[in-house]
């Protein structure tokens, strides 16, 4: 059984695939394929949503043992909400639609439900999976911890 942890931003799809157990997790995709940038040619929200749908379907079809998707949603307050955070929420909905279309459960998580504070995020994820050679940061760490939380 595998769990797809995913974090979507307006410019990038970050994902991690976890297998094993919570006590002994393994992340299977961190050496090669863990981030998918939205092509710059996509200029509308509709185009990005369609691209995201297709890419998440592709990830699932390449990893047939995915049984659940854990989606790390953005955290913002009423005062920090802006156009990009609303669009990110729309993209989260696209991931949920893929799950529904593939009959895969989708669970949404915040830091509190991941059991970590933002300040501890990178260290907690590195303890679980080690660091990626490139692009190590909050977004991939959120995808890693999301995937592991679903085991």
Image (cartoon, helix red, strand yellow):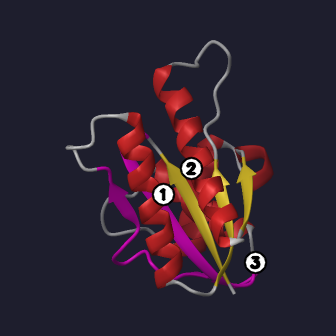
Quarter of the figure with the C terminus? bottom right
Viewer-side residue, 65 vs 134:
65
Whether pointer 1 and pointer 3 mark residues with C-beta atoms closer than 8 Å, the reply is no
- The percent position of residue 129, horizontal first and vertical second, equals 54, 74
Q: How crowded is mark 1: few (under 14 residues within 10 Å), some or many (20 or more)?
A: some
Q: In which quarter of the image is residue 148?
A: bottom right
Q: Identify the disc placed on residue 94.
A: 2
Determine the CA span between mark 1 and mark 2. Answer: 6 Å
Viewer-side residue, 61 vs 133:
61
Provide the secondary structure element on which disc 3 rests.
Answer: loop
Residue 115 in view here: no
Residue at left 48%, top 57%? 53
Q: Residues within 10 Å of mark 2 (few under 14, many from 20)?
A: many
**Earlier along the polypeptide chain: callout 2 or callout 3?**
3
Q: What stretch is highlighted in magenta?
A: 10-38
**Earlier along the polypeptide chain: callout 1 or callout 2?**
1
Viewer-side residue, 107 vs 118:
107
Viewer-side residue, 101 vs 147:
101
Is residue 2 depicted above or below 86 in this figure? below
Whether pointer 1 and pointer 2 mark residues with C-beta atoms closer than 8 Å, the reply is yes
Residue at left 49%, top 49%? 8
Q: Name the residue under label 1.
A: 53
Foreground mark, 2 or 3?
Answer: 2
- The percent position of residue 48, horizontal first and vertical second, equals 38, 45
Quarter of the figure with the N terminus? bottom right
- The percent position of residue 28, horizontal first and vertical second, equals 50, 83
Q: Identify the disc placed on residue 22.
A: 3
């Amino acid at each position: 059984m595998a769990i797809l942890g995913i974090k979507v931003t307006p410019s990038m799809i970050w994902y991690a695939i976890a297998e094993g157990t919570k006590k002994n997790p393994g992340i299977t995709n961190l050496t090669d394929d863990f981030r998918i940038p939205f092509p710059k040619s996509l200029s509308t929200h509709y185009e990005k949503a369609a691209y995201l749908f297709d890419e998440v379907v592709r990830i699932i079809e390449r990893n047939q043992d995915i049984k659940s998707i854990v989606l790390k949603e953005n955290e913002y307050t009423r005062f920090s909400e802006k156009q990009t955070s609303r669009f990110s929420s729309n993209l989260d909905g696209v991931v949920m639609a893929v799950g529904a279309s593939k009959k895969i459960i989708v669970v949404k998580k915040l830091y509190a439900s991941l059991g970590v504070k933002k300040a501890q995020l990178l260290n907690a994820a590195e303890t679980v999976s080690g660091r990626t050679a490139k692009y190590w940061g909050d977004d991939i760490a959120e995808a890693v911890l999301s995937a592991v939380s679903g085991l």
